[in-house]
Each structure stands twice: as C-alpha cells, then as structure tokens.
Amino acid sequence: MDAVELLQRLVRIPSPNPPGDTVAVADFVAERMRAIGCEVRQPAPARKPQARNTIATLGVGEPRVMLHAHIDTVPIAATEAQKWSVDPYAGEVREGALYGKGSIDDKAVLAAMMRVMMAAARQEELAGSIVLVAAAEEEVGGQLGTKWLADNGHLPVCDFIVVGEQTGNKVATAHKGVLRATVRTTGKSVHATNPDRGVNAILAMSKIIAALDRYHHDLSRLIHPVVGVPTCNIGMIAGGSTANAVPDACAIQLDRRMIPGEKPEDVVGELRAVVESLHLAPATASIGDFVYSRWFDSPLNTDHARRFMDCARRRLNDDPGPVGYLPGSDAKHLMDLARGDMIIFGPGSYEVAHAADEHVRLEDYALTTDILLDFARETLFAD
Ligand SMILES: [Zn+2]
C-alpha cells in the first residue's frame, strides 16, 4: 500500500464526532500496526466504548518517542454538505491534493506517522521505542480520549512527543488555554412607565462589560513570544424579556484566553476583582460557572527538539519556527507525560481543516512524512 492509498483508506472510513464512533478507523490502524509486528492495545472508556483508541508500540526502553494523532473528525454540517465539490468520504485526488473530511485534520499526519512505524518495523533493532497513539475524542475536547488515556495509565512517559495537527509543517511549541465564565447581574423588575423605581440588571451589566473591555486591553501588556497576548472576549449576552419592563436579570458569557504561565486560579481571581471592584448597588453581581482547558508550552531545549528542528529546517529549506498553534489540541492532556519536549507538527492549515473541500496537498503530506522519518532515523534507527 503506497502513501496515497494509505491516506485514502483512512479518509474512506468516516469518523465524525459527534457521534464519535472511532471503532472502524481505530481497528484499521490496529490491523496495519499488528501486521508489521507492533504490540497493539485498544483501550476505550466504559462510558463511551465506541470511542476506541489504538496504541501501537515498537521497541523497548529509552529514548521513547510518542507520535500522536486523533482519529475523529468534525461532522459535516447540513449547511456545509452542498458546498463540497467532491464526495467527502471518497479520498479523491485532484491536481496534487487529496480531498476528504478528515484528510488534513488529522488523517494525513496520522498516515505519515503510520509510515514512520512501518519504517521502524523494518529495522533489525531500535535504539529505544516508538509509540503511535491514534486517539478518539479530540474534536470534543479529549476528556474521554487523550485525557482519559493519560489519566488511566494507558500512555507512557516519553522523551519526545509529536502531536499531529496542522502547522504547515512548522514546529509549534505552544498554544493558549481557555477559561470560560458566566457573569450574572440581578436587579428588580417594575413597569417601564417608572423605571427609577426598579433596578435595571442590564444597566448594571453594562458597567461590568465596560470594565471587562478595559481589562481585555490591559492584558495586552503581557506577551508570550510564540502565542502573543492573553485576551478576554464577551461572546454572549442575555437579559430582559420585554421592552416595557425593567429587567431584573442579565447574564454574559466570556472566554478568557490564557497564555502559557498564567494560572487558572489567578485568572479567576482577576475576573472576580473586575466584577467586585464596581459600584453596582442596589443591583448585585456574581461570577461563576468556571470551566477551563490548559495551555501548552514546551521550552524546545532538549537534544531531541534540536534534532527535530534540524530535520525540519533541512527538508523545508526554510525557518521551521517555533510557531504558535491557535486552536487547542490534545497536547494539553499530555503535559505530564512529556519528560522532554513536546511539539505540534503536521501538514496544512487548521483553517482548511473544518471547512468544505477539506484537502491536503500531497507534497505537504510527503514533506511531513520525510521530516518525521528523518527524525526517527536519527533518533532510533541503528543503521
Ligand atoms: Zn485536529
């Protein structure tokens, strides 16, 4: 099976999430990896047994390298379906690109990683071990995918981890974390003929909104060399029920992007301080419903990282980065398993990833494979 055929086979196995049934694609990876002599395990959480993962290992001991890619894709939205000019699950090749849902996100880099495993299997002996993780559930946050695998001891501590996502074959070493929160104001409802007798929860919220906007601008004082500045966006508002009454409740939802180094508990404290510093009485305000996902950051100062950068620089004939990766990834769930560096790396752009006519340029896919192969060869291959 050549490189293009392998990727076509993966694209032809739909794995949209939701619903997140990855059994068929996980089994395809497992079967190929067993055939070349890998030790293969396929754990799945009891809460969602159809979210099947495949973990394939070659060699023993250290250095241990992990190649991680997710096997679920986003679903095809009803509004998106007519925009496709090809069958999204056919894996059609046209003008040097392979089209299909999941082609770039994340099956191209998965196929490249499988090809590295195949090359490693042809070695008589490896100077260490290599682990391929084909993970479910990334598109819905990874709680029952990579986080579950990591928390339940299914993944080993590694000296170098490559998380496959779309970085244009550059080396990404950081992404932001996200903290979501809801702010609520409470007032007193009266008829709109005499609003001064009531307490307007929307007016109270407007002061909070203005303060949060100032806070957002103040955050630009902090800057991370790779991912830039932290931000605070107010993305949703709800309040009142009719124009002829004073509203007694208003709520906003906000999205606070954290740069590496920011602690969620500190950010919660900052947000509380913004809300509590305002004089809103007799209206009251509260902030809560905090949910967060971690940032990821890697110092890129190990020998493995330097070697990977060299491999990328040679093949790209260009500066390999480091760059930031704007969307989140499963890297955040692997931080405790990374004894050395961890990078995000793969072909194409995430902007092509969740859109109609998703595709990967075959030359980018080949470049990804070559860089990963060079790295594996210099790190683990004896010859
Ligand atoms: Zn992805």
Image: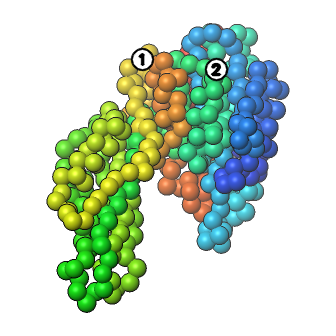
Q: Measuring 83% from the left and 26% from the top, which residue is drawn there? A: 35
Q: Do the residues labelled 1 and 2 touch (CB within 8 Å)?
A: no
Answer with left or right where residue 343 lies relative to residue 267. right
Label 2, secondary structure: give it.
Answer: strand
Q: In this view, does 321 lie to the left or right of 358?
A: left
Q: Quadrant of residue 258?
A: top left
Which numbered dot is residue 302? 1
- Can you tell which mark lies on residue 43? none
Residue sticking out furthest to the bottom: 193
Say what amino acid the circle numbered 2 marks: Ile
The image shows residue 297, relative to residue 338, as above or below, that is: below
Residue at 22 percent of width and 86 percent of height: 194
Distance of mark 1 from mark 2, alpha carbons?
18 Å
Residue 246, how many percent across, how many down?
30, 79
Front-most of residues 5 and 239: 239
Q: What residue type is labelled 1?
A: Thr
Residue underneath mark 2 = 130
Q: In this view, does 270 lie to the left or right of 256?
A: left
Quadrant of the rendering where the C terminus is positioned: top right
Q: How crowded is mark 1: few (under 14 residues within 10 Å), some or many (20 or more)?
A: some
